[in-house]
Amino acid sequence: MKTLRVPLALALLPLLGGCRSHMLTDYRPASEAGFYSGTIEDLKKLNTSDAEVGELIKLKRVGVSEQTMVGLVQIAHEHQHSFMNTDAVKNLAGANFSDARILQIAQLDKLDSIGGDAVMLHVIGLSDPTVQMLLDKRIKGVPTMSVNAIAELKNTGLSEKDIVYRIQNGMTDSQAMAEVAVRKKAVAQNTGFRSNRGRRAR
């Protein structure tokens, strides 16, 4: 009987190894959402979870391609985590980033940080070309001015063209904040507070 132990253990390995898999994932919602059968098969091969399927359906509704979604799941799994960066992908797509660029950011595992920057830069009021230029620097790891510093400069009245000029010339956050302080001081001096106190009526 002892000779049966090794074959039995080997036979159980696939079952034991599958304990972490999502064998019972329900792909019917994806089918109902209009996913192609081929895409669903690709997702099955990637061992996609129910939660991930739910996130992908949200991306489907905003027009992200199925090929890109499969790529996002695959990349997330390569980074040893589930794909749950739906909002970041939607933000990047809303900033007119191509699917190829979104996948590039996913490969760096920086969807949330770079996607968040995309939103804030749009909130500040920068144009799409400027937003893409700034995020491209972040993708390439090129040091560039932070979103907060850019916002502070813009609040002092600098135009987008002026800000881009400073960024392209390598202005750092500390230099930007120093200029912000100077500009605010100049504004305060030009608009100086004048006392409204006058002589009391007799």
Image (tube, grey):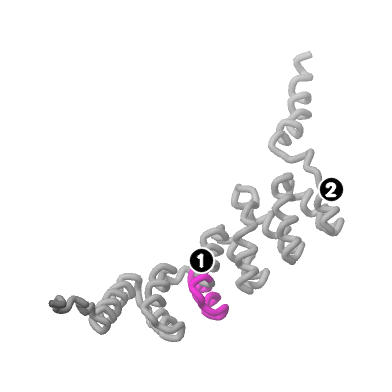
Mark 2 or mark 1: which comes first in sequence? Answer: 2
Q: Is residue 122 left or right of residue 145?
A: right
Is any part of residue 198 visible from this angle?
Answer: yes
**Vertical placement of residue 90 versus 96, above or below:** above
Q: Is residue 139 left or right of residue 16?
A: left
In this view of the protein, which residue sits in the foreground, 48 or 5?
Answer: 48
Q: Which residue is mark 1?
A: 117
Q: Which residues are magenta?
A: 123-139
**Vertical placement of residue 55 versus 176, above or below:** above
> How many dots with numbers?
2
Q: Which residue is mark 2?
A: 28
Is any part of residue 140 visible from this angle?
Answer: no
Q: Residue 145: within the magenta? A: no
Q: Secondary structure at mark 1?
A: helix
Instruction: Give coordinates of residue 55: x percent, y percent.
Output: 70, 53
Q: Residue placed at 13% from the left, 77% from the top?
A: 202
In this view of the protein, which residue sits in the foreground, 160 or 10?
Answer: 160
